Image (spheres, rainbow, N blue to C red):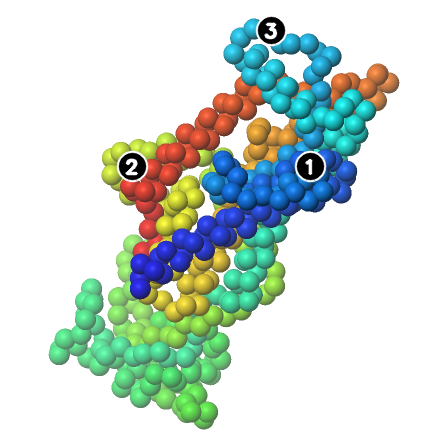
């Protein structure tokens, strides 16, 4: 049964990834069609086509490898016919090949339904559409997680009682250990603590703070049991706790011996968006240091050291974590919440990663469009003729280097996720 649950978790992650990619490409497709650009293909995945159907001028389909997707827009770059062939050399040949491939998407010189002829703001909107779709999906998922399901919080309802006051460092009770104050006071599982020493408490943290601040001092507990309130008196046992901040010696705190009930507490509606943007900042810090992080992951793989749990993961690693969550010995709602959280984090990663200002990523296309806009604004300011559109095919060699680097880092992460995986448990 655990193996089946593990596989279900992996399948859910694959389906979630496919949906995230589909929405990402839809974020490009809708504004492209709205602005009149001819879109030849809308594909989920890479490699051989598994299924496709043409509707109008666009072919929609799925490919064999669900690790990405794309839409094929006419005229991503300006035509190169007037510039002639490039000179010799590998990079020059690559540039020329890219120009030829781009020219094939152009219906003719008089065709205005091409990407490069759009106003700058429309090109930026099209390229932003994909990443923004992932960000919006992450906000929805985190809102469902935090406001729909809630955050698991320790409440003032007693789940269980400790049998004794264990000796320092002990994990179990002996016959010599005194009974826990909660047992002596007559507390029972299911009791809800309403107030302590006249102070109302609504969370276990509030109750715990008062108990810990009263070692050896009698306190009055108002509890609710079977719909009726009762008053009990307990004396927290003094035990050695953690040292306060800035102090070397441990502090003496009160111990009552109660274990709280954990419940899902819905959070305000703004908690989901807040969590999403906090994750954007956190993932941005990882992406910024991605080469260093991947190198360290490779070193940990070779040396057998434990990986940084906050480091980068491949799709394989995300699938393994989803499998672990699905197979965990926990209530179904907890596992559902875990899967939703992973999918939300995945979409944040897709958003941040695609905003990196390097071709062939969306952020690179946005930079090209903005540079074109700056050149045009500069020419207009000084009353010069409009400049030629920016020819991004000249950046193909740099793009190739980026692609090779991404493939290499992806391979390292996949191998590490197989042989030295990050585990939640």
Cα separation, mark 1 vs mark 2, equals 43 Å
Residue 367: x and y in percent read 65, 29
Can you say whether 240 is above or below 359 in the image? below
Residue 218 showing in the rendered view: yes
Name the residue carrying label 1.
Answer: 39
Left or right of residue 324, residue 276 in this image: right
Residues 322 and 204: in front is 322
Q: Is residue 308 above or below residue 150?
A: above
How far, Cα to Cα, is label 3 from label 1?
32 Å
- Where 203 sits versus 288, above or below? below
Label 2: few (<14), some or many (≥20) within 10 Å?
many
Residue linked to disc 3: 87
Report whether 14 appears left or right of 69.
left
Tell me the SS state at disc 3: loop
Mark carried by residue 10: none
Mark 3 surroundings: few (<14), some (14-19) or many (≥20) residues within 10 A: few
SS of the residue under disc 1: strand
Residue 373 rendering spot, x and y as whole percentages: 75, 27
Residue 256: image quadrant is bottom left
Answer with mark 3 or mark 2, whichever residue precedes in sequence: 3
Q: Counting residues from the N terminus, which is met first, the one under dot 1 or under dot 2?
A: 1
Q: Quadrant of residue 169?
A: bottom left
N-terminal of the pair, mark 3 or mark 1, is 1
Q: Position of residue 125 (x, y in %)?
A: 70, 39
| Residue identified by numbered label 2 | 301
Left or right: 291 with respect to 4?
A: right
- State the SS at label 2: helix
Point 47% across, 77% down: residue: 201
Q: In the picture, residue 294 is in which quadrant?
A: top left
Which residue is drawn at the image coordinates 30% and 82% (left, top)? 182
In this rendering, does residue 124 appear at all?
A: no
């Amino acid at each position: 049964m655990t193996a089946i649950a593990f596989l279900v978790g992996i399948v859910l992650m694959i389906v979630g990834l496919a949906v995230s990619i589909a929405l990402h490409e839809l974020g490009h497709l809708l504004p492209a069609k709205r602005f009149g650009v001819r879109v030849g293909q809308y594909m989920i995945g890479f490699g051989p086509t598994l299924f496709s159907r043409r509707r109008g001028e666009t072919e929609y389909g799925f490919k064999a490898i669900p690790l990405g997707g794309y839409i094929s827009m006419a005229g991503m770059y300006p035509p190169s016919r007037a510039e002639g062939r490039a000179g010799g050399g590998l990079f020059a040949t690559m540039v020329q090949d890219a120009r030829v491939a781009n020219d094939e998407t152009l219906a003719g010189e008089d065709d205005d339904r091409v990407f490069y002829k759009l106003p700058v703001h429309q090109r930026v909107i099209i390229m932003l559409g994909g990443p923004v779709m992932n960000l919006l999906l992450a906000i929805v998922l985190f809102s469902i997680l935090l406001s729909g399901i809630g955050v698991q919080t320790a409440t003032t309802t007693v789940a269980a009682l400790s049998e004794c006051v264990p000796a320092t460092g002990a994990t179990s009770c002996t016959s010599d250990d005194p009974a826990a104050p909660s047992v002596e006071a007559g507390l029972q599982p299911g009791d809800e603590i309403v107030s302590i020493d006249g102070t109302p408490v609504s969370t276990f943290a509030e109750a715990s703070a008062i108990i810990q601040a009263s070692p050896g001092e009698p306190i009055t507990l108002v509890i609710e049991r079977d719909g009726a309130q009762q008053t009990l008196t307990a004396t927290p046992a003094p035990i050695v706790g953690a040292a306060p901040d800035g102090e070397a010696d441990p502090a003496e705190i009160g111990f009552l011996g109660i274990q709280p009930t954990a419940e899902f507490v819905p959070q305000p509606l703004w908690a989901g968006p807040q969590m999403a943007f906090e994750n954007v900042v956190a993932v941005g810090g990882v992406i910024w240091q991605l080469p260093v992080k991947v190198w360290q992951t490779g070193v940990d793989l070779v040396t057998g050291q434990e990986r940084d749990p906050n480091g980068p993961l491949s799709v394989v690693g995300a699938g393994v974590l989803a499998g672990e969550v699905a197979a965990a010995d926990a209530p179904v709602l907890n596992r559902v919440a875990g899967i939703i959280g992973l999918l939300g984090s995945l979409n944040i990663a897709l958003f941040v990663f695609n905003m990196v200002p390097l071709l062939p990523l969306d952020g690179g296309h946005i930079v090209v469009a903005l540079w074109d806009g700056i050149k045009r604004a500069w020419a207009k300011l000084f009353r010069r003729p409009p400049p030629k559109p920016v020819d991004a095919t000249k950046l193909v060699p740099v793009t190739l280097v980026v692609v090779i680097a991404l493939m290499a880092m992806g391979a390292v992460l996949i191998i590490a996720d197989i042989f030295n995986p990050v585990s939640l448990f």
